[in-house]
Image (tube, rainbow, N blue to C red):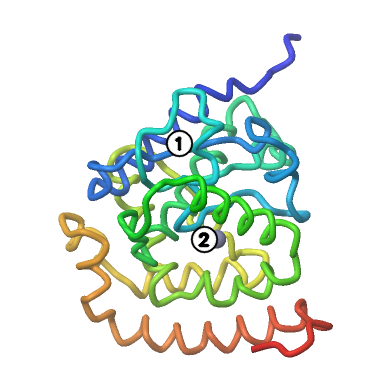
């Protein structure tokens, strides 16, 4: 039997396709999807155990010198830990595209829920160095990253954006797993996540023509708000113990 090997360029292009479909408002910006093995391991190494993807407002600057097709200007960038994403798949030949798309969409939802401003700083040797140092620090500080997940993956903005992105993709024929995209299933459970999704009702279909910035200005259904409060408590109680030992937590 022939051994299946990932075609990283093909996986990248499927991931980009999903990002473009989910977020047409990013059409004027280049989107960068890179795998960590394509970047210098001194900075973008394996990261902490379980790290599957990484993004941030200035990641594009940090990777700008390492892109095969060159840097096309400021825009969203996701670093994907491809080997790790594929490692636990039962049938990678069939599941790889979805698994990579799920992590890429997760990262794009950070861009959308936090409304990154790609005009905030320009590319220069100083800003590139600063962005690179920042990523190296984050990746080398696993406890800090795990702790920060409480804030990064909150339900009012981030999870809501994930639900919208997933439904948009579903309407376009791409069926991704919502708990996998949210990245929260191991921490807060599938059942709670699915309740949030159903509480949002048909909002994703009704607001499908809006930008994510405009969607986030709309009030969520009461039941969704109630679940958000409940969810906050769960995240607090279930995630905080993992950050034990960190002094002066703020
Ligand atoms: Zn995340």
The vertical placement of 83 against 202, above or below, is: above
Q: Residue at x 73, y 90 (%)?
A: 248
Confirm or reject: label 2 Cβ below 8 Å from ligand 1: no
* Cβ–Cβ under 8 Å for marks 1 and 2: no
| Residue 102 picture location, percent across and down | 51, 46
Q: Residue at x 27, y 47 (%)?
A: 26
Residue holding disc 1: 15
Q: Which quadrant is the C terminus positioned in?
A: bottom right
Using a 10 Å C-alpha cutoff, classify the residue at mark 2 as few (fewer than 14 neighbours), some (14 to 19) or many (20 or more): many
Report the Cα–Cα distance between label 1 and label 2. Answer: 16 Å
The vertical placement of 206 against 173, above or below, is: below
Confirm or reject: label 1 Cβ below 8 Å from ligand 1: no
The vertical placement of 168 against 88, above or below, is: below
Q: Nearer the viewer, mark 1 or mark 2?
A: 1
Residue holding disc 2: 182
Q: Secondary structure at mark 2?
A: helix
| Residue 166 picture location, percent across and down | 38, 52
**In this picture, residue 96 sits left or right of residue 45:** left
| Residue 231 picture location, percent across and down | 52, 82
Could you say which is closer to the camera, residue 139 or residue 95? 139
Disc nearer the start of the sequence (1/2): 1
**In this picture, residue 211 sits left or right of residue 116:** left
**In this picture, residue 169 sits left or right of residue 24:** right
């Amino acid at each position: 039997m022939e051994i299946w090997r990932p075609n990283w360029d093909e996986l990248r292009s499927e991931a980009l396709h999903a990002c473009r479909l989910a977020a047409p408002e990013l059409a004027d910006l280049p989107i960068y999807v890179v795998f960590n093995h394509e970047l210098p391991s001194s900075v973008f190494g394996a990261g902490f155990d379980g790290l599957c993807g990484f993004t941030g407002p200035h990641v594009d600057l940090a990777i700008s010198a390492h892109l095969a097709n060159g840097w096309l200007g400021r825009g969203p960038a996701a670093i994907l830990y491809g080997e790790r994403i594929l490692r636990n798949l039962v049938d990678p030949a069939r599941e790889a595209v979805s698994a990579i798309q799920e992590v890429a969409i997760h990262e794009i939802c950070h861009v959308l829920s936090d409304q990154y401003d790609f005009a905030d700083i320009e590319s220069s040797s100083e800003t590139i160095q600063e962005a690179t140092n920042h990523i190296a620090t984050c990746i080398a500080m696993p406890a800090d990253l795990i702790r920060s997940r409480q804030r990064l993956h909150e339900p009012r903005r981030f999870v809501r954006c994930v639900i919208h992105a997933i439904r948009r993709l579903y309407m376009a024929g791409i069926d991704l797993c919502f708990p996998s995209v949210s990245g929260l299933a191991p921490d807060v459970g599938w059942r709670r996540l699915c309740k949030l999704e159903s509480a949002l009702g048909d909002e994703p279909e009704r607001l499908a023509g809006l930008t994510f910035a405009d969607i986030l200005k709309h009030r969520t259904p009461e039941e969704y708000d109630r679940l958000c409060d409940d969810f906050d408590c769960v995240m607090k109680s279930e995630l905080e113990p993992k950050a034990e030992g960190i002094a002066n937590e703020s």
